Image (spheres, rainbow, N blue to C red):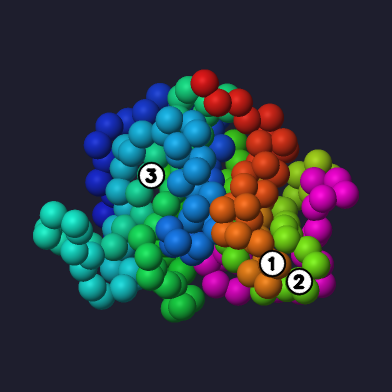
Amino acid sequence: MNSHLKTVYEPKLVKPLLVIEISGPSDPPGIAARMLIERSSAKPFAEYYSQNFPDHVIVTEDGTCRLPRYEFYESTRSKPNLLVACSDEGIFLDDPEGGYDVMENIIQISSKHRASTIILIDNIQAEPENLIYVAATSKRLAGRLKTPDVNFLADTWLAGPAGILLGLCRLRSIDGLGIFINQTFEDTNERKAEASLNLIQNLFKVKYA
């Protein structure tokens, strides 16, 4: 198995935003994604598995086991429509080839559902005075982010899956936005997650049903 997408049903979405977290459920990015699922009443419709994920199984509360995965949720009740991708704990993509393979498949899923923008939420280590940093794949999108509360990453590089995903978006002329939550900023994980969601909501005028 290189990768496998298990689809429960095909949602009928109109130019959705795809929001993906790259840190697992217990960190602020994962908390933000799950808060978004709850607020938008999103429903699970697909599961993505890859041989590049760790070589273990997850034993659930009822004693059954399954492979690590990304789970995809959809909301047609929100405006704009939403796709949200959440990962299991401990999915690390340290191997560049594996990172490219997984992020390429994520983009294919996004393209299949004609997502208008891919938004990734991840952690970052930075100076402690700022909570949120951003990077965009186009000057047009970056121009929309120029507000006093937004801090741009500049004159640096992004390693790992986050960098690969944004780089592939740029290569394919896809609108991509990276929202990076500063781990050294002193606040609760929930409030950090809330700040990233507020940025998405304000930038894309997200409304929940």
Question: Mark on residue 72?
Answer: 3
The residue at 29%/63% (across/down) is 68
Q: Are marks 3 and 2 in contact (CB under 8 Å)?
A: no
Q: Nearer the viewer, mark 3 or mark 2?
A: 2
| Closer to the camera in the image, 89 or 189 | 189
Say if residue 120 shows up in the picture. Answer: no
User: Residue under circle 1?
Assistant: 186
- Residue found at the very far bottom of the displayed protein: 95
Q: Nearer the viewer, mark 3 or mark 1?
A: 1
User: Is 42 above or below relative to 14?
Assistant: below
- Residue found at the very far left of the displayed protein: 63
User: Residue under circle 2?
Assistant: 128
- Percent x, y for residue 74? 42, 34
* Magenta highlight range: 145-169
The residue at 48%/56% (across/down) is 30
| Closer to the camera in the image, 98 or 123 | 123
What distance separates the C-alpha of mark 3 from that of mark 1? 31 Å
Say if residue 126 shows up in the picture. Answer: yes
Q: Are marks 2 and 1 in contact (CB under 8 Å)?
A: yes
Chain-order first, disc 3 or disc 1: 3
- Percent x, y for residue 153? 77, 64
